[in-house]
Image (cartoon, rainbow, N blue to C red):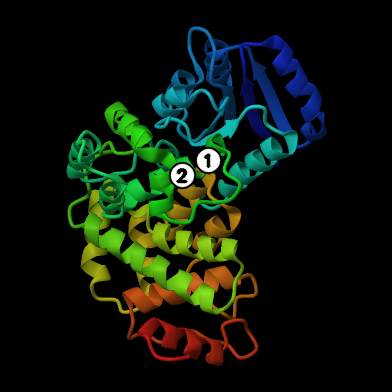
Amino acid sequence: MSPQRIMFVDDEPNLLSGLRRMLRVKRDVWDMQFAEGGEQALALMAQAPVDAVVSDMRMPGMDGGQLLAEVRRRHPQTARIILSGHADRTAIISAVGPTQQYLAKPCELELLVAVLERVLTVRGIVHNDRLRGLLGGVESLPKPPRVYEEMMAVATDPDSDLDDVVALIEQDLGTSAEVLRLVNSAFFGLPSRVPTIGRAVGLLGLETIQALAVAGAVFASGGPTPPGLDPRQLSTRGMQVGVLARRIATVEGWPREAVGDAFFAGLLHEVGLAVLAGSDPAGWSALLAEGAQVADLEAHRALEVAHLGCAATEASAYLLGLWGFSEPVVEAIATQPGVPDDPAASPAALLLGFTCRQVRFPQAPQPVAEGAYLSPDRADRWHQIATGDSV
């Protein structure tokens, strides 16, 4: 197996030399390139593409955002990461589209290595090169044009408040995902993950929301919504699955962070569907026709793979992994549909599978297994929570 190729870009030769020294421990597993500026980086990539690019933001001539925009256009399969100081908020907003992850400077070596290892691991979720390029090239998720129009109206209305912004964002799954990605990035340096849209908007603040709207970042359309895909219905379904997963995890006594991850996984488990559907109208039409006839999650997933090339959950996990969402969230989504007799299925994956079935196919039997985490007794308890019965 050939080593994974990573490029580091900075206009300061001394900083590149320091990175080269610190990363010697990875030289047996990574093929590393070091480029002094964007032009040199693109020239080297034209000779041999790389798996990931880590670029400084502030560089003369071509800055980091401009470089990653070109990398996205020419090499969409390449993961794109920005290193930036906290004072560069305006520059970060301008780079929201082409950048998949943000790391704050100074960045600890352990964090940099961990982020890159996770990004490189995510590539194993989707094996089709065309789909990798499609998903890796996503700049903004498909969303209805009204989202941008309404956000501009709310953001520029002196009488609007953050509650208005939250209500608008929660109506669209793509917008929710992009807001959560931004606020949970290392750029903001928050001590813990932000688990709700309301909290995310509160931390961003109305001023940042306005700047994002004016810049066309986060709230831009990202392309038309595929015919037959109702964005509001998709958002409602994600919210229902996320809220139910959070409720069950809370009753089960899971740690607070795990409860937040359960909500994220439920909310965002179908975020890649619009991208897949938009790239293959014929496959999407066939899936719509045949999917209406199935009555369980496993059969619907098989149709997604047959008609779109991979399952919606695999596409979602791939996107969220590239965007830096936590490993438990990505793993829970990637391993759907979780079944209790699978020894690799985590409690988080089993919970997501249960809540997806409960919301989408409530009449279908839930898979259980004696002696497994999702035992008949636990499934009964979760069903009571889902239906509002006493437990």
The secondary element bearing badge 1 is classed as loop
In the depicted structure, whether residue 344 falls above or below residue 191: below
* Closer to us: 110 or 198: 198
Position of 168 with respect to 103 (left or right) is left
Residue nearer the viewer, 294 or 376: 376
Q: Is residue 385 left or right of residue 39?
A: left
Q: Identify the image quadrant of the N terminus.
A: top right
Marks 2 and 1 close (CB-CB < 8 Å): yes
In percent of the image, x 44 and y 38: which residue is there?
133
Any part of residue 37 in sight: yes
Drawn side of residue 61 relative to residue 159, left or right: right
Where disc 2 sits, the SS reads: helix
**Residue visible at 50% across and 51% down in the picture:** 194
Label 1: which residue?
185
Q: Up-down: is 356 above or below 264?
A: below
Relative vertical location of residue 378 with respect to residue 69 in this rendering, above or below? below
- Amino acid carrying mark 2 in the image: Arg
* Count of picture labels: 2
Does 255 appear above or below 321? below
Residue 91 spot, x, y in % from top left: 45, 22
How far apart are the two marked residues, 2 and 1, measured between alpha carbons? 6 Å
* Residue at far front of view: 159
Which residue corresponds to the image point at 48% horizontal and 19% vertical from the top-left? 67
Q: Amino acid at mark 1?
A: Ser
Q: Give the residue pinned by disc 2.
A: 181
In front here: 71 or 4?
71
